[in-house]
Image: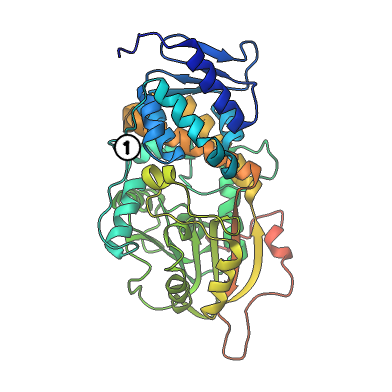
C-alpha cells in the first residue's frame, strides 16, 4: 500500500487506545502517515508521528526500544516533545507491556504492518569473543571514532565526555566540567611530580588538567585512534611535552611500572560484569603502596539487566552497567580499600540537558559532520539518558579506593575538607 493510502479511522483509534493503556495517559496525540489522528489536540504532552507504515514494521521487528530506535533513527517515526515522551516511557511496567502485547500486535497488523528486524547502517557489527581485547577495541571505535568537531559541538571547550559538576543548576557547562576535573584531582590528592594514569581518558581533558594545574606526570590511555591523534596535537598546543601523554593502549597492557594515582572516568561501563574482577586486579597492580584510585561510572538499580537493546546496538555495543554495591565489592576483593562513595546523579541529568541543547543548536553542523542517522542516534540516546538520571533509574558514582601500604597506611587524611576549598590548590611554579 502506498504511504498516502488512507487508514481505517477505527484502526487509528485502536492503536491510540492500546498505547494509552501502556503509557497510562491519554494526554498525547497520535498522527499517522495518511493524516488521520487521535488523542489530545490542544495541549498534548507529546506527539507521536508515524511518517510511514515502515515505523510500525520496525516496532514489530525487534525488542521495543531497539525497534523504536530504528524507526526514529531512520526518520519514519518522529516525536514532538521528545523529553516528555521519554519521561513517560522510561520506566514502563513490563507486566503491563506483556499483558497488552497481543493487542499491540493485532492492531499493528490490522494497519498493514509486517515485522522488519533488519539492522540499519549505523548499528554496531562487532566480531569475536565478548570483551576480548580486539572486540572491546572495536566497540570503543564504533562510539568514539567520530570527528572531534562533532563532539565539541555539544561537549564544550574541554571535550569531557562524562558528567560535569554543577555548583548550581544554572552553572554553565564549561565551568561545571572544569569543576569536575578539579574535583577528581582533589579526591586523588595529586602532588607535583607524582605519576598519574587515566584509564579510558577520552580526548585527554583530565590528563591535561592534572598536568597543568597539579604538576603530575600524566599518562592517559584509550582504545580510540582518533582520540589519540587529537590529544597528541593538544599536547603540543598546550606545551605539555614531557608532562602529559595520551597513548593507544588497553588497561590490560603493561604500562611502565606503578602509579601514585589512577583515575578511570566513564570507562567501567565498557568493562563488563564478568571482566570486573580482572579490571580491579589490574587497577590494584598499577598502583604503588598507598596509591589512590578513583573509579567514576554509571550505575544501575539492583537486578537491572544491561543497558538496553537500543544503546547496545547503536551507542555502546557490549556496554554493561553495574550496581554500585557490586562495584565496591569487586574493588575490595581485588585488595583495594574503599574510602569514599559519592552519587552525582543529578549532575549527570544537568550535563545531558546541556549536551542536548547544544546538539540541537548546532544540528545542521552535526548532520554535516556525521550524517543524519548518527546525529539522530545521539539526540535520542542523550535525551533518554537524561530522563534516566532525572528519574533515578540510573545513577553515576565516584568510588575512591586506596592500595594500603605494608602496615595498613592509606595515605588519606582524616578529613576531606581539602576537597572543597574555595580556591584551587595549584602547585607553585606550575
Q: Which residue is drawn at 64% across and 31% down?
A: 24
Q: Nearer the viewer, residue 145 or 139?
A: 139
Crowding at dot 1, Cα within 10 Å, few <14 / some 14-19 / many 20+, comes out as some
Q: Mark 1 points at which residue?
A: 117
Residue ID at (37%, 25%)? 113
Q: Is mark 1 on a helix, strand or loop?
A: loop
- Image quadrant in which the N terminus is located: top left
Q: Can residue 189 be seen in this view?
A: no
Where on the picture, by quarter, is residue 201? bottom left
Q: How many labels does the image show?
A: 1
* Colour mapping used in the image: rainbow
Viewer-nearest residue: 325 or 283? 325
Residue 316 screen position, x and y as percent: 40, 49
Left or right of 118? Residue 272 is right
Q: Which residue lies furthest to the bottom in this view?
A: 407
Q: Position of residue 334 (x, y in %)?
A: 51, 78
Q: Which residue is drawn at 40% across and 36% down?
A: 67
**Position above or below: 146 against 85:** below
Rendered position, 152 above or below 215:
above
Q: Residue 339: image x %, image y %?
A: 65, 72
- Tell me if I can see residue 299 in this picture: yes
Give 94 or 220, whichever is nearer the viewer.
94
Q: Which residue does the image show at 30% across and 12% down from the upper left? A: 2
x and y, in percent, of residue 275 in the image: 42, 68
Q: Nearer the viewer, residue 243 or 54?
A: 54
Amino acid at each position: 500500500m502506498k504511504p498516502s493510502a488512507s487508514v481505517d479511522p477505527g484502526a487509528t483509534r485502536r492503536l491510540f487506545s492500546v498505547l494509552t493503556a501502556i503509557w497510562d495517559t491519554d494526554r498525547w496525540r497520535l498522527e499517522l502517515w495518511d493524516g488521520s489522528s487521535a488523542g489530545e489536540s490542544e495541549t498534548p504532552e507529546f506527539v507521536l508521528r508515524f511518517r510511514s507504515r515502515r515505523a510500525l514494521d520496525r516496532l514489530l521487528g525487534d525488542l521495543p526500544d531497539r525497534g523504536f530506535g530504528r524507526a526514529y533513527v531512520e526518520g519514519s517515526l518522529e516525536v514532538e516533545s521528545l523529553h516528555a515522551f521519554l519521561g513517560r516511557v522510561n520506566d514502563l511496567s513490563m507486566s503491563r507491556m506483556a499483558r497488552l502485547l497481543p493487542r499491540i500486535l493485532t492492531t499493528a497488523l490490522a494497519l498493514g504492518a509486517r515485522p522488519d528486524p533488519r539492522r540499519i547502517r549505523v548499528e554496531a557489527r562487532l566480531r569475536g569473543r565478548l570483551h576480548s581485547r580486539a572486540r572491546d577495541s572495536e566497540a570503543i571505535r564504533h562510539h568514539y571514532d567520530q570527528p572531534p568537531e562533532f563532539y565539541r559541538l555539544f561537549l564544550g571547550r574541554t571535550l569531557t565526555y562524562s558528567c560535569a559538576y554543577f555548583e548550581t543548576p544554572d552553572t554553565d557547562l564549561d565551568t561545571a566540567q572544569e569543576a569536575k576535573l578539579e574535583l577528581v584531582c582533589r579526591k586523588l590528592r595529586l602532588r607535583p611530580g607524582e605519576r598519574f594514569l587515566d584509564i579510558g581518558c577520552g580526548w585527554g581533558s583530565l590528563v591535561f588538567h592534572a598536568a597543568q594545574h597539579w604538576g603530575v606526570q600524566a599518562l592517559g590511555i584509550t582504545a580510540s585512534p582518533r582520540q589519540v591523534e587529537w590529544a597528541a596535537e593538544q599536547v603540543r598546543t598546550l606545551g605539555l611535552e614531557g608532562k602529559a601523554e595520551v597513548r593507544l593502549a588497553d588497561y590490560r597492557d603493561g604500562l611502565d611500572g606503578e602509579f601514585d594515582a589512577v583515575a578511570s572516568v566513564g570507562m567501567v561501563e565498557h568493562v563488563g560484569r564478568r571482566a570486573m574482577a580482572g579490571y580491579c586486579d589490574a587497577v590494584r597492580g598499577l598502583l604503588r603502596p598507598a596509591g589512590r584510585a578513583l573509579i567514576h561510572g554509571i550505575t544501575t538499580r539492583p537486578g537491572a539487566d544491561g543497558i538496553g537493546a537500543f544503546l547496545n546496538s547503536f551507542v555502546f555495543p557490549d556496554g554493561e552497567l553495574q550496581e554500585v554495591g557490586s562495584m565496591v565489592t569487586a574493588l575490595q576483593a581485588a585488595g583495594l580499600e574503599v574510602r569514599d562513595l559519592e552519587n552525582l546523579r543529578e549532575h549527570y541529568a544537568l550535563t545531558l540537558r546541556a549536551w542536548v541543547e547544544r546538539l540541537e543548536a548546532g544540528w545542521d553542523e552535526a548532520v554535516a559532520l556525521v550524517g543524519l542517522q548518527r546525529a539522530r542516534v545521539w539526540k535520542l540516546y542523550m535525551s533518554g539518558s537524561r530522563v534516566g538520571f532525572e528519574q533515578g533509574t540510573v545513577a553515576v558514582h565516584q568510588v575512591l579506593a586506596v592500595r594500603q601500604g605494608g602496615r595498613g597506611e592509606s595515605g588519606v587524611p582524616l578529613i576531606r575538607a581539602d576537597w572543597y576549598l574555595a580556591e584551587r590548590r595549584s602547585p607553585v611554579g606550575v
